[in-house]
Amino acid sequence: MKFNKIEGKNVSEIKMFTLSTCGWCKKTKQYLKDLDLEFYYIDIDSLEGQDRDEAEKELAKWNPAMSFPTIVVNNSECIVGFLPEKILEIKQKNLK
């Protein structure tokens, strides 16, 4: 399972499960870029076969409803949906 990397400030490990056609996913990606945060994302709908199965299994661990976007922070915290205030919190909490 290969995530796409977007360059920015590395304040936390931010992994995002998205759909290429999801408006809220696009908004979330843009918001992370606007904050200049490094993050990784994977468009599940662009995957096939075993890669897709693995991504869906990983997503279901964090968000059993499997809704999008799902953001996993430092493999310990999960944010479901477009929640700018939560994303901003991550940036502020982890700025050094």
Image (cartoon, rainbow, N blue to C red):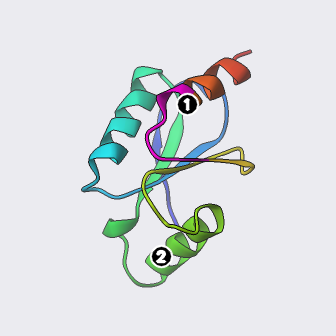
Mark 1, other Cα within 10 Å: few <14 / some 14–19 / many ≥20: many
Is 42 left, or right, of 62 in this rendering? left
The circle drawn on residue 51 is: 2
Q: Residue 53 location in percent, x, y?
A: 49, 80
Where is residue 35? Give x, y as percent. 47, 21
Q: Is 80 within the magenta?
A: yes
Tag of residue 87: 1
What type is the residue that disc 1 sits on? Ile
Disc 2 marks a residue whose amino acid type is: Asp
Foreground tag (1 vs 2): 1
Which residue is located at x 72 percent, y 22 percent? 93
Q: Is residue 63 above or below residue 23?
A: below
Q: Which residues are magenta?
A: 79-85
Q: How far apart are labels 1 and 2 at the CA level? A: 27 Å
- Mark 1 lies on a secondary structure that is helix
Q: Nearer the viewer, residue 9 or 28?
A: 28
